[in-house]
Amino acid sequence: MIAENFKLFRESVAAIALVVAISACSEPAPVIEGTEPSLRRLTEQQYRNVIADLFGDHIVVSGQFDPILRQDGLIAIGAGNATISASSFDKYERLAHAIADQVVSKGNRDLYIPCAPARLDGADDTCAQAFLEPVGRLLFRRPLDPVELSQAVNLANRASEQLGSFYDGLAFGLTSLLVSPNFLFIIDELEEDSSGDPELTDYAKASRLSFFLWNTTPDAELLDIAAAGGLSTQDGLETQLERMMQSPRLREGVKAFFADMLHLDDFEHLEKDNLIYPAFDPQANDHAREQLLLTIEHHLLDEDTDYRDLFSTRKTFMSGPLGRVYRTPVSEPELWTLHEFSDGDGRSGIQSLAGFVALHSHPGRSSPTIRGKAVRELLLCQTVPDPPPEVDFSLFNEMGSEKMTARERLDAHNSVPSCAGCHRITDGIGLSLENYDGAGQFRTKDVGLDIDTSGNLDGVDYEDQFGLASALSQNPALPVCLVEQTLAYGLARDPGREAKDWVGYLTEQFVQDGYRFKPLIRSVAASENFFAVTRPQQNSAPETQVGALPNSTQGTDS
Amino acid sequence: MTLLKTQKPSRRSFLRGTLAGTAVSVGVPFLDLFLNDRGTALASGAPLPQRFGTWFGGLGHTPGRGIQALEGTDYEFIHECQSLEPYKKEYINYFSGFNTPLDGAASAVHYTGWVAGKTGSVPQGFGVIPAPTLDTIIADKIGTKSRFKSLELSSTGRPIDSYSYRSSGNHNAAEVSPVNFYQRLFGPEFRDPADTDFKPDPRVMLRQSVLSAVEDDRSRLERTVGYEDKARLDQYFTSVRELEQQLEVSLSAPPALEACRRPAPPEDAPIGYEVETVNASHDTLSDILALALACDQTRVFNMMYTQAASEARVKGTTFTHHILSHEEPPDDHLGYQVQTAWFNERGYQALSRMLDTFSNIREGDGTLLDNMLVFVQTDTSDAKTHSVIGIPSMTIGKAGGRVNTGLHINGNSAPQSRIGLTLMQMMDVSIGEWGTKSMRTSSPVAELIA
């Protein structure tokens, strides 16, 4: 029953999106009211990217960042609802001092500070300002106002006098910018248009564009354009979009989006038992993550081709540590090399790569349920119901379950009707990925028995993962999910039901553009809807859901 | 008046320090070094500082294999919890039979139980934190005079494994690395009581100036955002103030607390779910924590041994603690899940080992355990069925004599929020009622109150 309801729900969602898309075919983009302005906490990667943009890679950003809890499937949305706890701020403050000390150190100061102080043993107002003003503009993503600037300069001056060192004092001025909420949060600043309605300032538009496409702060040129009001004209916006789409930073931006959508942050704490899977060592772990991103980057940016084919492509990249996992010779183990799987390798699509299947497995074995759930939720934007409470697992405890194949164990689960509904949703997908063990290594047997990889996805039956790849690529929910996630990521908000017409329109555009990702993100960023905001609410709203337990399979397994 | 240690600096010497060679006034230090004749209170008559902690171990214990109920409120720790028996009479209360009334909400497995126990409210699904967890409420009351308002720790290796929240979006992440934890507590900023030549660090004052400057932005920023974002900014500025307070503490000379000393730094060690790694990490974190408490660096802590639905595992095996709890068949002869029980037992042994550490810290005529209250929690009463009925919990410690101990208290289906309410009241939180819907209560557990 659950499975049937789920299927109806899924079909209705995809059908609505496509109907809307078709009806929107020849229409102009529907206008949405807008989303509420956001206050987004910088993610760890964004923080690192900004510091690298400003000061280069040799300023070390070391230390633990407290995690931002994922919400509605995305860290981007979680960042739009996160604050900064006392322990997090403690870490930011230490980090800020560590960065500032490096910037003003003897070895680095000439690189970053555009002037020599009048004296080394005290304050120099002019030189401090010459450094803090442009750095502050990039950190705050807008010019510092006179009060902010004088505050930072005064602080630097006071510290320089007290410590008897211009540079040591300047570090405190820089620290004050790095711990400011204007840096740690991306703030949608508003102004009123001629009708008195709220709209984003040009600087806020620049930030929204830059973090969406580059996952970092706007560069100086974008801020200059914003200062001149250039992002409020369609021509000005298009010109900047063209430049941003051509920038090498686009690669980081696209990878950041897919890392969020595919939950690749989970690699940081992924564990594989090194007795069972000795090849999947920490280096292989890191490379498995990178392989996914390189494959996506190559397919969507270099080849600029159909997103759906990402789930059936044989092309990927290989490295020495991964060669041991895939049991394939690697000619240049120190480098990433383009690699194409053959039929006998049994791989097609990113869902068959070691990273994807290992990420959605247990430390010591595979998990068709977790893998099926991942495909449903991450790739098709469908919700697998939570495990039912009060299931008595003793009903299917059997001796020797460690000697059973995954399919046999799941057959046992499915003897309980309340479990069977959801397992039918997930297991038809996951069982066809059983040729990959818990570390993503190819196998044909499990506990000494031949593996049966037959399965079913939304009415399409198949015999193996190649069949799954085909069914997944053609699933109508796949492109709609990408459009929805792209919007949610860019807005740091669930676009909500109000945006369904826009989702439909963008999906149609996506179809017409051959399911290519670059035109999709360009369409999103070029749209007035992307910058449309409503007036901030002044009343409280109910709590929303954030976070989840690991792999969200709290109820059961296999 | 008795000075418990010799060669302590005079109180007067605390009142003046130097800042880069310049004499400055510093705050009057915490006067813990002056204890009364019995060593149970400060000379001023104020009691010794009380601490509050939580300890969480996923999946609890097998029903019937934790305690043996004896006559009245007497009980005995057995089997999986046997390692706690030496502390039972003097320090531990065991709660059974307290309920989690759902009021029609679906039970989110491995989640609803602990959230309800820590917030007094049943969450509407995974990830929802309906109210601040009680440790944060207690920290606001008793944690304002120590260097850190609270410390969160996890031996799982994942910072996200902390059940301390002020709201859904305000999570107190856990410290997972003993090396980082040590640096934070006992690194260069630690005021070593053995250092008789204390001088406030001028850089600390400048750090305070930075924070003051940040706070100047507050009104400007809050004018520009909506209700929810303003609340989040408020929380940010609260965090700024807490750091200012933390820095303020480090500007005064260190109190010469009896058992305070800087421990040896821990060696870098692996972190992760493998059970030996979890236990080693738990031991090291506990050792550092004990001295952090002894040095009054914090008065509130949250320690997670393993998360709900524990992912602990044994190297070379394919089933985790959680999966075993569901799929391991009971032994034909013994009648229980042998491997699952083994994991459970390891958890309580780790807790017992932490109590050993705490009880080795002398304080007045007792130990740390006499001046703390630890709330021990888990996620289910029967992992096999995910039941939230009768989730076992415990209190450990005497809380300065405020709590009766050695009791087995059967809640007879009373809401588990009664335990949380009692804990907060014992920690001086002014609260008469707590919780929502059927979890709302104004009845503390009277048997606990000494």
Image: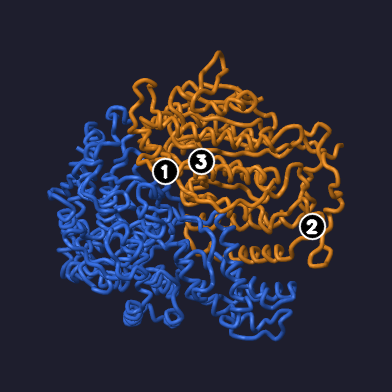
Chain colours: A blue, B orange
* Tags 1 and 3 on a common chain: yes
Which numbered tag is attached to residue A404? none
Q: Is residue A505 visible?
A: no
Is disc 1 surrounded by few (<14), some (14 to 19) or many (20+) residues within 10 Å?
many
Q: Nearer the viewer, mark 2 or mark 1?
A: 1
- Most foreground residue, B409 or A402: A402
Q: Quadrant of residue B43?
A: top right
Q: Is residue A46 left or right of residue B400?
A: left
**Residue at left offset 15%, top offset 47%:** A454
Q: Amino acid at mark 2?
A: Phe
Q: Amino acid at mark 1?
A: Lys
Disc 1 and disc 3 in contact, CB within 8 angstroms: no
Q: Is residue A67 visible?
A: yes
User: Which quadrant does the C terminus of chain B fall into?
Assistant: top right
Q: Quadrant of residue B62?
A: top left
Q: Which residue in the structure is indicated by mark 1?
A: B315
Q: Position of residue A441 (x, y in %)?
A: 28, 53
Q: Amino acid at mark 3?
A: Tyr
N-term mark: 2 or 1: 2
**SS for callout 3:** strand
Q: Which residue in the structure is indicated by mark 2?
A: B198
Q: Position of residue A469 (x, y in %)?
A: 18, 57
Q: Position of residue A348 (x, y in %)?
A: 20, 60
Q: Nearer the viewer, mark 1 or mark 3?
A: 1
Which numbered tag is attached to residue B305? 3
User: Which quadrant does the N terminus of chain B fall into?
Assistant: top right
Query: Which chain is mark 2 on?
Result: B
Q: Is residue A137 left or right of residue A356?
A: right
Would you place residue B342 above or below residue A240 in this image? above
